[in-house]
Image (tube, helix red, strand yellow):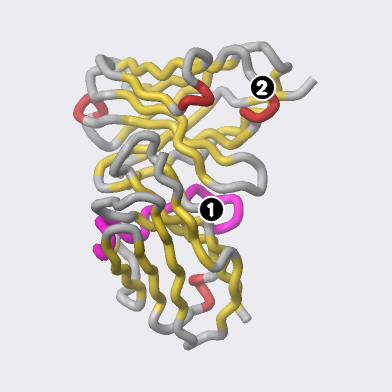
Amino acid sequence: EIVLTQSPTTMAASPGEKVTITCRASSSVSYIYWYQQKSDASPKLWIYETSKLASGVPDRFSGSGSGTSYSFTISSMDTEDAATYYCHQWNSSPWTFGGGTKLELK
Amino acid sequence: EVQLVASGGGLVQPGRSLKVSCAASGFTFSDYVMAWVRQAPKKGLEWVAAISYDGSGTYYRDSVKGRFTISRDNAKNTLYLQMDSLRSEDTAIYYCARPTTGFDYWGQGVMVTVSS
């Protein structure tokens, strides 16, 4: 099983601040996917195939990485970005998710 | 508009069974692999099972293999998850989701609580 380790697990950012979340895989994967989940809501696909923004996602979001190391960046934190973000791989079964990063507004 | 509407959650005693359903609309259901993903209270996401577009292939995480059965009825555009021999650790919100490039659509989730 490929284990995805996200860091940090929680963080707070002020409006306008740059945010970076990392996702490390225990084995190499071809792509990482990122989801946004707000309280009491279903997750939403946010970034697919490592760096492609899902429909409707603002371009202040970006993703990068390869192999076992990936990152998720918000260039300028907005109030609406407060949420939990999960990375995900489906390179091999079982499909796995990272433990999540809770991003709060400072 | 793609919609996935789950139903059938509830409170069930350990060792008993429960079947949850997911009604799909807004896309050609029979063209897509479908899956269930769960989230235990205050915890992260965990993939549970997936089924091929025609139902001929099913895939499970080890912890539910032999206890859960994923199925689909393409004539009814409905996905199912039959859960037998339920354990307290199966307590979670169960989401149906459509895996294409990642899970691009998610249902609203149904709560399954396993408790005596």
Which quarter shows the C terminus of chain B? top right
**Chain of the residue where label 1 is placed in the rendered structure:** A
In the image, is residue B104 above or below residue A70?
A: above
**Chain of the residue where label 2 is placed in the rendered structure:** B
Which residue matches tag 1? A99
Task: Return the x and y of residue B13 as percentages of the image width and height.
Answer: 73, 17
Which residue matches tag 2? B87
Identified by mark 1, the residue type is Gly
Q: Residue B79 vs residue B16: left or right?
A: left
Task: Return the x and y of residue B69 as percentages of the image width and height.
Answer: 45, 15
**Disc 2 + disc 1, Cβ < 8 Å:** no
A42 is within the stretch colored magenta: yes
Which residue occupies 42% across, 55% down? A87
Identified by mark 2, the residue type is Arg
- Mark 2–mark 1 Cα distance, whole angstroms, equals 22 Å
Which secondary structure class fits the magenta region best? loop
Q: Residue B50 vs residue B109: left or right?
A: left
Question: In terms of depth relative to the viewer, which is nearer, B4 or B93?
Answer: B93
Q: Residue furthest front?
A: A27
Which residue occupies 32% across, 55% down? A32
